[in-house]
Image (spheres, grey):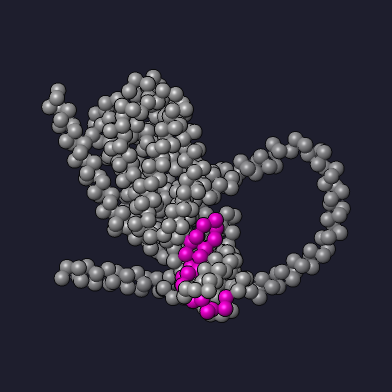
């Protein structure tokens, strides 16, 4: 009996050391740029993500049912109040119709994505990350829809992030709110360069902006196109806070993203026509790394 | 409870099924009702339960499986949670004689204490990777409400997990260990 217990202890020590060593090795090797998944991992996410999508849509439907039917107990009382409001609002409607027409014209003029020479894939957000440490989204489009790793993701309000990991029908997006997502950006007015990183509370930080750059509050921030991930000129947001000390070489610039990530439902994935070439470039780099390491 | 390899498969599958349901809840339902900033880490709850109540040489492998399953729902990866889980289980194995789940309040307290240890280990690993203290500070402010919710839910979920791992709720809150 004692011999069996001793054997069990030895086995436990061996397993603990093995699992700890494997975990620590994987932590040290993990890169937060993108994640190439194994076939098994892809299969598992392909199995779970539809259920996440179903749960999302069910929740929305239930919310709609609650709003339209169950919450109507006091509808008759509200009806009288609403009738009065309706009369008031009808008078405003005429003005708004004019504004709406103007809005359509302006939207046509801006037409956010028409200048970007990429194939565009519309996708729906189906889930968020299971850890609050990471700001990622899961969308319902994947390899079969033409997406590739590090494809840019945008909305009409600006940049969302890039494709971090990918299966046949789903993709995880590393948003610009995540500290692991570093984007080369420039201030539209002054052309000052900096690196944008996720910060907290839905804000981002523009680092390495030299102290002498005349950045002011409200300055628009765009992608610079450097880094080979994002196309140039995609709006990100506006400068929301600046701290400039009398010493040091850089200034503290906080950027408030234009995209409201808490209300994100649909996104646009920009797929470059030459993504295949880029994949081959990555492969060639990987190969050269392997060869270099073997020497 | 002493658990042999042959006894592990069915309870583990049930535990994974529970984790699956809870992860779906955390990644879809909570964000829709407006909880974007805070996500309840149910994987920690399950790993802590295993550490508290299972005595098997294969505990580290069980933790690895739970964390590996968890990483399908997050880009966090399985490694840091596995390191934290195994280290905590080693700590628990030394402190087993002084840890008692005599009441729901004790369960809540002990769970909260070991979540702090979990936070410390994961923060250390994250800092070694990112080298950014502000990220850890931000994580700490999220950790406080998230960990309190997990601790408050611990007695309920531990009783469910007791049923999976012992076949009855007699060992609920750890009596009989």
Magenta stretch in the rendered image: A195-215
User: Considering only vertical position in the picture, is A56 above or below A90?
Assistant: above
Q: Which residue is found at the position 34% from the left and 49% from the top?
A: B80
From the top left corner, tell me how far across and down residue A193 is, in percent.
Answer: 49, 76
Q: Which residue is found at the position 38% from the left and 60% from the top?
A: B131
The reply to whether residue B157 is visible in this rendering is: no
Residue B20, magenta (yes or no): no
User: For residue B52, which quarter of the picture?
Assistant: top left
From the top left corner, tell me how far across and down residue B149 is, in percent.
Answer: 50, 38
The quarter in which the C terminus of chain B is drawn is: top left
From the top left corner, tell me how far across and down residue B5 is, in percent.
Answer: 24, 31
The reply to whether residue A10 is visible in this rendering is: yes
User: Considering only vertical position in the picture, is A148 above or below A212?
Assistant: above
Residue A205, magenta (yes or no): yes
User: Looking at the image, which is closer to me, A50 or B127?
Assistant: B127
The quarter in which the N terminus of chain B is drawn is: top left
Q: Which residue is found at the position 52% from the left and 47% from the top?
A: B38
User: Looking at the image, which is closer to me, A193 or A171?
Assistant: A193
Q: Which residue is found at the position 44% from the left and 40% from the top?
A: B42
From the top left corner, tell me how far across and down residue A243 is, in percent.
Answer: 55, 68
Instruction: Single out the residue that lies furthest toward the left.
Output: A3
């Amino acid at each position: 009996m004692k011999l069996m217990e001793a054997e069990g202890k030895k086995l436990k020590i061996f397993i603990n050391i093995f699992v700890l060593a494997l975990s620590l090795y994987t932590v040290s090797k993990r890169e937060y740029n993108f994640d190439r998944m194994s076939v098994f991992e892809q299969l598992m996410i392909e199995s779970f993500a539809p259920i996440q999508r179903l749960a999302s849509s069910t929740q929305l439907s239930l919310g709609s049912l609650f709003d339209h039917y169950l919450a109507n107990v006091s509808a008759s009382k509200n009806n009288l109040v609403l009738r009065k409001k309706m009369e008031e609002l009808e008078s405003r409607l005429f003005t708004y119709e004019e504004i709406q027409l103007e809005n359509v014209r302006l939207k046509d003029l801006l037409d956010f994505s028409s200048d970007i020479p990429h194939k565009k894939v519309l996708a729906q957000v189906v889930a968020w990350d299971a850890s609050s440490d990471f700001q990622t989204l899961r969308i319902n489009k994947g390899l079969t829809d033409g997406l590739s790793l590090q494809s840019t993701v945008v909305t009409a309000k600006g940049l969302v992030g890039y494709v971090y990991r990918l299966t046949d029908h789903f993709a995880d997006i590393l948003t610009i709110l995540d500290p692991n997502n570093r984007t080369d950006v420039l201030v539209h007015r002054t052309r000052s360069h900096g690196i944008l990183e996720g910060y907290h509370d839905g804000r981002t930080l523009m680092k390495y902006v030299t102290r002498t750059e005349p950045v002011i509050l409200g300055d628009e921030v765009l992608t610079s196109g450097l880094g080979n991930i994002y196309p140039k000129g995609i709006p990100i947001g506006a400068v929301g806070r600046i701290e400039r000390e009398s010493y040091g070489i850089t200034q503290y610039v906080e950027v408030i993203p234009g995209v409201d990530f808490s209300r994100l439902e649909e996104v646009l994935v920009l797929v470059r026509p030459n993504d295949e070439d880029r994949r081959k470039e990555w492969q060639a780099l990987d190969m050269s790394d392997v060869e270099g390491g073997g020497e | 409870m002493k658990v042999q390899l042959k006894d592990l498969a069915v309870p583990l599958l049930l535990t994974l099924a529970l984790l699956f349901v809870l992860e779906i809840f955390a990644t879809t339902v909570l964000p829709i009702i407006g909880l974007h900033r805070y996500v309840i880490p149910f994987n920690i709850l399950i790993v802590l339960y295993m550490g508290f109540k299972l005595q098997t040489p294969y505990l580290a492998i069980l933790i690895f499986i739970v964390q590996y399953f968890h990483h399908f729902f997050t880009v966090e990866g399985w490694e840091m949670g596995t390191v934290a889980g195994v280290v905590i289980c080693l700590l628990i194995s030394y402190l087993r004689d002084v840890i008692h789940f005599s009441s729901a309040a004790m369960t809540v307290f002990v769970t909260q204490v070991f979540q702090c240890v979990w936070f410390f280990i994961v923060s250390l690993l994250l800092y070694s990777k990112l080298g950014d203290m502000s990220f850890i500070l931000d994580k700490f402010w999220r950790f406080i409400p998230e960990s309190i919710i997990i601790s408050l839910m611990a007695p309920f979920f531990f009783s469910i997990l007791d049923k999976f791992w012992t076949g009855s709720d007699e060992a609920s809150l750890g009596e009989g260990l």
